Amino acid sequence: MTVPVHFSESKHERIFPEPTSASDVDAQLIHPSAVFIRYNALARTFMSNRPLGDASHASLADFQVGREDAGVVIEKEAGEREGHRMASMAWLGVHSGRPVFVVIEETEREEQDTLLGVRGIFNIMPADEEATIMGHALVVAQFRLCHKFCSKCGSPSSPSLTGAHVACGACKHSQFPPTYPCVIMLVTCKDRAAGTDHALLIERRSLVHTHIAGFIDVVETPISAAVREVKEESGVDISAISGRGVRVLHDLIQPWPFSSSLMIPYHLCCDEIYSAPPATDPCLTEVLGALWLSKSDMALCLKGEGEYHMPGANSVARRMMEMWVAGDL
Ligand SMILES: [Zn+2]
């Protein structure tokens, strides 16, 4: 078993019975060691309780606030509708015996300019359960902010008892945080003449060189999405690939909270196509170009000594590169 990728350690979820009544929720809200973390919609990041600009490490404790700062108010009036407690928060689960909640803020704060963005935060968090909790919080907060109204009839939506999903007050239509499946492909081949291995990379508009990846379309299998995306973004046709040339990297499947997606990584070995240079469709807006990069050049790039910028530390894209370079794939 390889070292877990970021956001794949999720033991905090659902191992504890989910609250099923308002009094259950209250009990967790007033639990002496309840954890509250705040996501600010305007700053689009988590509010930290210490400056993280130059920090090299962060943990859940850096984002915890007290119950009062979290604005927890428990209404006791009779007839109160379910979900009121969760008007601007959501229960995420129980971590080490401590209920965890995300508080969703939509207010401007003075310190917003100095905050570290979400991607920066996850770059300094280890790939552990706490990072998964924060990733879960990000997905739920983004979902809640984008689902204030029913997608079916347009009436206002209300959060569920735990705040983890929403339901329409008029037509009762329920909406849950989605997971969008994606494929990400390490496409490799061998230059037979030189005896060297190469990987197909694209250059994104962010100037990062990385693997081709994309959402699985409707009525599409993961492998057909992989073949289509490689063709679209590099012009390389791998439709003939099959058998031992196709491998799903199960240990590296990664929930990716920034886009609510689930990354399904493939290693696709295509020995015979090295002679076909990649040719990016100029109509594509997200890709600047494509190239075959040798394993030795990729090793240099991963050390920061090569020609190209590589993906961030918490991405499965980088992990796939590191494992391929090390001979672990
Ligand atoms: Zn509705």
Image (tube, rainbow, N blue to C red):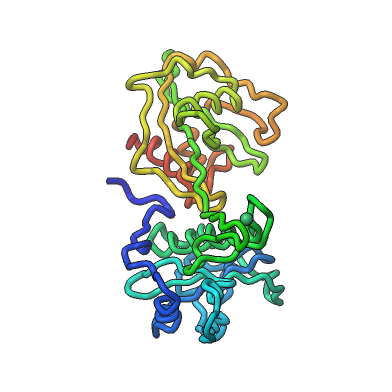
Q: How many numbered marks have been drawn onto this rendered protein structure?
A: 0
State the quadrant of the C terminus: top left
Q: Residue at x 40, y 30 (%)?
A: 267
Residue 133: give x, y in percent of width and height.
44, 63
Q: Residue at x 66, y 62 (%)?
A: 156
Q: Residue at x 58, y 72 (%)?
A: 87
**Nearer-the-camera pick, 158 or 244:** 158
Q: Residue at x 52, y 40 (%)?
A: 301
Say left or right for 52 vs 194. Answer: right
In this rendering, the answer to whether 239 lies above or below 120 is above
Locate residue 169: give its quadrant.
bottom right
Say left or right for 150 vs 237. Answer: right
Residue 192: give x, y in percent of width and height.
42, 14
Residue 89: give x, y in percent of width and height.
54, 71
In this rendering, the answer to whether 76 lies above or below 63 is below
**Nearer-the-camera pick, 70 or 75:** 75
**Nearer-the-camera pick, 231 or 152:** 152
Say left or right for 70 vs 97. Answer: right
